[in-house]
Structures are given as structure tokens and as C-alpha cells.
Amino acid sequence: MNNTLNVLKKCSGRSKHFPRLKHYGVIKKLVFKVDGFNEDERDPEWTNRPFIIINHEHVLLSSMLALSENGCLPTELILHVGLGMAYALAALHMAGFIHRNVSPHSFSYPVPLTLDLLSSRMIITDLSLCTEYPYKNVPRVTVPFTGS
């Protein structure tokens, strides 16, 4: 969550390839409904949860395979997807960040779906594994392990 907020704050208004940051903050007390009654958060360790509200009219790229009848998408469509992802990553790199988890689950495409919009308006929606590059204190002494 902190990485996403850091990237969105630094990239606000710099590119069309990032979602618009609407609001962010901390939820002091979480209240939810169970069987028609309001209940407070039960876990005392989960106070002050951070939240981010972003605005975009896009659909996750990973859902595009559902448009196919046989599990394959047309070559021209895939070329535009790749171009859109490359433009979005280039915008991220120009802002001084790298993405360490490039996958269809990290990108979204605009609605309505056209080839022009697909290649020019793709956005990066999952910025949780982005990191600033070049590193300010090079070389790093320790590197936290992330992944499987």
C-alpha cells in the first residue's frame, strides 16, 4: 500500500498511464455489518488501516481472455496490448520507478475497447511492487526477499 501511494503521489498528473489518486488516509476504526448488526473490528492489531481511493474507468487486462471463445486472442489485438504495456512501463520508468511484477494482473485497459485506446491508454493499476530507480544509496547492503 505504501509503495502504491508513493508512486501515485509522485506521478500525479504526469502521465495518462497511471490511475488518478482521489483520496488516501487511515481508517481509525473499521465497522462492518454481520446479520444486520454493526460490528467493530475484532482484531486489535489492525487499527489505523491505510486506504487509497483511485479513479479509473478501466478493466483488468487479465479478464481479456474471457472475450475469447477458444482461449486465444487475435494477433493484432495482442500486439496492441504489448504496445500499451510498453508505453505504460516507459511512463513509469520516466517517473523514476521500476515495476518488479509485470503481468496481466498489473494492467488495465480502457472501456470501450478499441485498438487505438488499447495501445495508447493502458494504465498500471497494481503499483505495489514498484520501487524507485536508480537507488539513492547504491549498492544496497541488504535486499528484502519478496516473492515465492
Image (cartoon, rainbow, N blue to C red):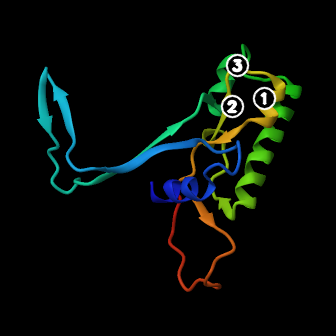
- Work out how far the residue at label 2 is from the one at label 1, CA to CA, in angstroms: 8 Å
- Work out how far the residue at label 2 is from the one at label 3, CA to CA, in angstroms: 9 Å
Left or right for 55, reference 120: left
Quarter of the figure with residue 140? bottom right
**x, y percent for residue 117:** 78, 29
Q: Nearer the viewer, residue 127 or 146?
A: 127
Q: Of helix, strand and loop, which one carries label 3?
A: loop
**x, y percent for residue 17:** 70, 43
Mark 2, other Cα within 10 Å: few <14 / some 14–19 / many ≥20: many
- Residue 85 to residue 142: above or below: above
Q: Amino acid at mark 1?
A: Leu
Mark 3, other Cα within 10 Å: few <14 / some 14–19 / many ≥20: few
Q: Amino acid at mark 2?
A: Tyr
Mark nearer the N terminus (3 vs 1) = 3
Q: Residue furthest top?
A: 69
Q: Residue at x 67, y 70 (%)?
A: 133
* Quadrant location of the N terminus in the rendered image: bottom left
List the residue tagged with mark 1: 117
**x, y percent for residue 16:** 70, 42
Q: Residue at x 63, y 55 (%)?
A: 11
Q: Residue at x 63, y 58 (%)?
A: 100
Look at the numbered discs 2 and 1 and tell me whether their residues touch, using CB distance below 8 Å. yes
List the residue tagged with mark 2: 109
- Residue 50 to residue 36: above or below: below
Look at the numbered discs 3 and 1 and tell me whether their residues touch, using CB distance below 8 Å. yes
Left or right for 7, reference 53: right
- Work out how far the residue at label 3 is from the one at label 1, CA to CA, in angstroms: 8 Å
- Residue 97 to residue 52: above or below: below
Q: Amino acid at mark 3?
A: Pro
Quarter of the figure with residue 129? bottom right
List the residue tagged with mark 3: 112
